[in-house]
Amino acid sequence: MTRREEQDDVSGRVGRRPGALRIVGLTLAGTLALGAAAAGWVYWHLDSNIRSVDINSALGDDRPARAVIPPAATASADASPLPTGSLNILVLGSDSRGGTANKELGGGDSSGARSDTAMVVHIDAGRTRATVVSIPRDTLVTRPSCPLASGGTTAVAYGAMFNSAYSVGGPVCAVKTAESLTGVRMDHYLEIDFSGFAKLVDALGGVDVTTGQDIDDDRSHLHLEAGAHHLDGKQALALARTRHGIGDGSDLGRIGLQQTLVKALLEQIAGARLLTDPARLYQVADAVTAGLTTDTGLDSLGELTGLGRSLGGLTADRVRTVTMPVVTAPSDPNRVIPEEPAADRLWTSLR
């Protein structure tokens, strides 16, 4: 090769190199842009899944006092403040009639909904321990007058079933009735419907539970022998709803199964290693948010993940499940009322 040919070859290679780098650069930039767009879409999608109700504005100041929040503690001078305030969250499982998925899972044919499951989740100061208190839906209470979204208010009802509050006044009335019953301020509200719960269990790969007795309930379509079982979403939902195939068929027997299921789900979530599996994490997040209704204090993905981070030290073995003490109602053997003074002592411990 002559010197001129060598120079031309070098010039050609130098000339081609910037073009190749530009192609690589554009490809990388496009990939990053697509990745950013995908991440943005995921955040928007999950965030838009969440429905919310402005409970604080609806109820105003006529409510139990908020818990006194102590000064934040820090692990060191440079560490971010650790959450120390206690929280009380009313968690409802609703048998919503809305949507095809809910109807297929037993939501019924009407347009209404009831709070099929009611729990007050109390998170201790420091947020490393929690108490989950189940309220039997058959509990007779004085249902207070509640504001309606359409205007006006509901009438006070004496001797009404606890779960009727949701039926007549939605989340706002459910919160007000729970606060009236317990004397405890509900800092937040969370509601998950039939399809959301089933999808969550399926996204987690099912859940392992052990039943202490045979379950044979044609109404919930659940038939299990006593022992260990791996349940999919539809079966787990049936377990949470069943009552006629166990014990005396009362709501108290069902609550025991629900509490077992709550513990099992917490253990399943802890062992799922979601942070190392982005695809599965998205499936779980999508399932949770798709069936979720919250108060306006938790109605964004950022607020929900912030709450989740603050509960990083809360493990399944630090969650205690109890049922509000009740006795048979004198007016109806199929209903219950709070057993006093035991019920009041329990609620006082959570204020």
Image (cartoon, rainbow, N blue to C red):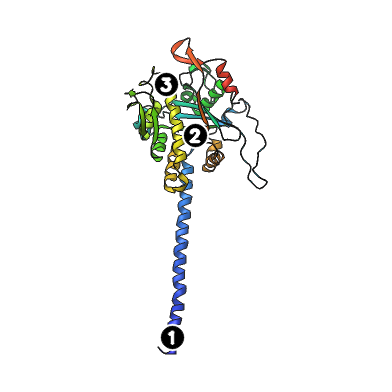
Residue shown at the point (43%, 30%) measured from the top left: 261
Percent coordinates x, y for residue 158 in the rendering: 51, 15
Q: Is residue 124 above or below residue 162?
A: below
Residue shown at the point (45%, 15%) measured from the top left: 335
Query: Distance from label 3 to label 2 (Cα)?
Result: 22 Å
Q: Which residue is mark 2?
A: 316
Q: Is residue 126 or residue 331 the one in the foreground?
A: 126
Q: Is residue 176 or residue 224 the one in the foreground?
A: 224
Within 10 Å of disc 3 (Cα), the crowding (few <14, some 14-19, many 20+) is some
Query: Distance from label 1 to label 2 (Cα)?
Result: 73 Å
The nearer-to-camera label among 3 and 2 is 2
Circles 3, 2 touching at the beta carbon (< 8 Å): no
- Name which residue type carries label 2: Ala
Count of all numbered marks drawn on residues in the image: 3
Q: Quadrant of residue 197?
A: top left
Label of residue 309 in the image: none
Comes first in the chain, label 1 or label 2: 1
Q: Residue furthest bottom?
A: 2
Comes first in the chain, label 1 or label 3: 1
Query: Distance from label 1 to label 3 (Cα)?
Result: 89 Å
Comes first in the chain, label 3 or label 2: 3
Secondary structure beneath label 3: helix
Q: Is residue 8 above or below residue 142?
A: below
Q: Which residue is mark 1?
A: 6
The nearer-to-camera label among 1 and 2 is 2
- Name which residue type carries label 3: Gly
- Name which residue type carries label 1: Glu
Percent coordinates x, y for residue 138 in the rendering: 45, 19
Quadrant position of the N terminus in the picture = bottom left
Q: Which residue is mark 3?
A: 253
Secondary structure beneath label 1: helix
